Image (cartoon, helix red, strand yellow):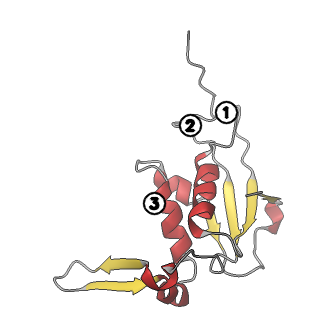
Amino acid sequence: MKTITPKQLEQLERKWYIVDAKWLTLGRLASKIAMVLRGKNKVSYAPHVDNWDYVVVLNCDKFAATWKKMSDKMYYTHSGYLGWLKESNLSELLVKKPTKALELAVVGMLPKNKLKKSMISRLKLVAWVDHKYGAQMPEELKL
């Protein structure tokens, strides 16, 4: 039995999805977004074919965190010099960079290969309700 591979140019139909992240749990939201960015919600899924969709996330700083993650979950950055390891918790990161926490969660759930950069470039994070992607007519993604 032969494996059927979808052709990239014939089935190239990229959709735009919009998600309101308000009061959704961070991990569950990130896993659903990663699944759409990877293209696993399509029938013509193939891990090596670029047929992924775009995802616009609104209110990406107003997600819900379970238990005490706002104070206990730590993010680390290192400059490369000795002793310059910086750490901040989730609540501090949301104040400094409101979109960074959700971006890091989604990036961690994507496969670690050469396609990761093009997948994450199709994720558009907005920290408010107004966005500039109305011309693409995004569909609401049910989570």
Looking at the rendered structure, the kind of residue marked 2 is Val
Label 2 element class = loop
Decide if residue 42 is on the left or right side of residue 102. right
Q: Which quadrant of the view contains residue 41? A: top right
Q: What is the spatial separation of the Cα atoms under label 2 and label 1, in whole angstroms?
A: 9 Å
- 126 up-or-down from 94: above or below: above
**Could you tell me how far apart the alpha carbons at marks 3 and 1 are, in whole angstroms?**
24 Å
Q: Position of residue 37 (x, y in %)?
A: 61, 52
Query: In what element is the residue under mark 1?
Result: loop
| Amino acid type assigned to the residue bearing label 1 in the image | Ser
Give the farthest residue toward the front.
67
The label number, if any, that marks residue 49 in the structure image? 2
Give me the C-alpha separation between circle 3 and circle 2: 21 Å
Q: What element carries label 3?
A: helix
Q: Mark 1 points at which residue?
A: 44
For the point 59% across and 24% down, which residue is it?
Answer: 5
Whether residue 14 is situated above or below residue 33 in the rendered picture: above
The image position of residue 16, as x and y in percent, is: 74, 56
Question: In the image, is 67 to the left or to the right of 21?
Answer: left
On residue 53, the disc is none
Asked if the residue at tag 1 contacts the one at tag 2, i.e. Cβ–Cβ closer than 8 Å, the answer is: yes
* Mark 3 touches mark 1? (CB < 8 Å): no
Instruction: Single out the residue that lies furthest toward the top.
Output: 1
- Quadrant containing the C terminus is bottom right
Query: What amino acid is labelled 3 in the image?
Result: Gly
- Residues packed near mark 1 inside 10 Å, few (<14), some (14 to 19) or many (20 plus): some
Q: What residue sits right under mark 3 in the picture? A: 108
Which of pointers 3 and 1 indicates the residue nearer the eye? 3
Q: Position of residue 62 (x, y in %)?
A: 66, 80
In which quadrant of the rendered view does residue 25 lie? Answer: bottom right
What quarter of the picture does the N terminus occupy? top right
